[in-house]
Image (tube, grey):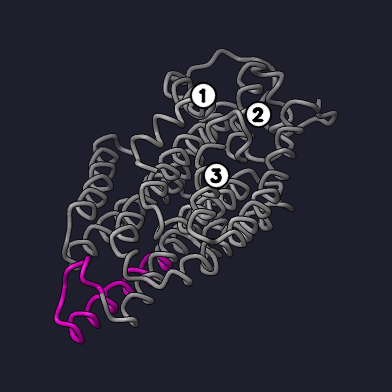
Amino acid sequence: MNPYVLTILLSSLGLGTVLTFASSHWLLAWMGLEINTLAIIPIMAQQHHPRAIEATTKYFLTQATAAAMILFASTTNAWLMGEWEIHQLSHPLATTTVMLALALKLGLAPVHFWLPEVLQGLELTTGLILSTWQKLAPFALMIQTAPTINSSLLVAIGLLSTLVGGWGGLNQTQLRKILAYSSIAHLGWMVLILQFAPSLTLLSLSLYIIMTSSAFLTLKTNNALTINTLATSWTKSPTLAALAALVLLSLGGLPPLSGFMPKWLILQELTKQGLPLSATLAAMTALLSLYFYLRLCYALTLTIYPNTLTATAPWRLNFTMITLPLSIITILALGLLPLTPAVTAMLDL
């Protein structure tokens, strides 16, 4: 793609998200979401591969449906209650419709079916943008509207997402689909705590972005798209393979890695709020996710694949990629747990 065109598209992507962040009026927020969607469509379709075009079409249709639902809900609220402000969303029909529309935009269960299929059709860099940056604008709206949404609905969507995210990833061999189900599970944890402690949701989102970025960049460096290809990573770069295994365990939420911090604090907060059953179910669904992360770790570090692969040459080559961002993000994805007391003090938890 022409660098000037790419610069314009990435700037528009940033503009759309910032516009949604800054807006207090539903029409301006909707406009930001639309700019965001229209900017990423050409980036997704730049491969000119049938799978990429199919993924782009699916993404466009789901995002257009969600945007139409948001517009319908905000118009309904303005018509019935006379308010266009995001904070003043008060009619039950409008709040439920907005919640479902934002769930569709993010890929939360039960409207998650598009996310694994779309992510599977994209290259890893575009998949990284879709899994991280594209979650920010809908989450900003969700945090602003959370106080008016029925808490039972939020807890139900959160628990269902953690369950679907864990269950769906069990039988996958494609790494992009596994990361998509991982994304669904992590978003479920964030929605679960959204109404009780929004600051914890932001902490979880920040750590999720750090860990997912590290995972995607590691896979891109190793040029791995399936578990079989991942098994040859050890011969290319032993250090990176060892760190990648730790990043996956961090995504699974094992101590003493960074990913344990949000899960620990969320379970603690749910128990404080008198929801021990929800906390127990969430912890049990985390075990499902942990299983497929351990499966990836096993393929990455404990197996030497015996067959001849059709992938890129598995012996060590000189890297031409810039590895500084990967190094920084990997350190953050592994070593932030000791900062938990400072984080809890900052967030007044």
**Image coordinates for residue 208, horizontal then vertical, percent:** 48, 41
Side (left or right) of 200 relative to 140: right
Tell me the tag on residue 245: 2
Q: Characterize the local packing of mark 1: few (<14), some (14-19) or many (20 or more) Cα atoms within 10 angstroms.
A: some
Q: Which residue is mark 1?
A: 335
For image coordinates 55% across by 42% down, the residue present is 264
Q: Which residues are magenta?
A: 61-89
> Is residue 67 left or right of 51 when viewed as pictured?
left
Q: Nearer the viewer, residue 49 or 105?
A: 105
- Find residue 188 and name its label: none
Asked if 174 appears above or below 31 in the picture, the reply is above
Q: Can residue 146 be seen in the rendering of this structure?
A: yes
**Mark 1: which amino acid?**
Gly
Residue 50, percent across and down? Answer: 53, 55
Q: CA distance from mark 1 to mark 3?
A: 15 Å
- Mark-to-mark CA distance, 3 and 2: 19 Å
Q: In terms of sequence position, does the residue under pointer 1 or pointer 2 come before the other?
A: 2
Q: Position of residue 103 (x, y in %)?
A: 44, 65
Residue drawn at the location 65% of the way across and 29% of the way down = 245
Instruction: Give the mark toward the camera: 1 or 3.
Output: 3
Magenta part mainly helix, strand or loop?
A: helix
In the rendered structure, which disc, 1 or 3, sits on the residue that comes first in sequence? 3
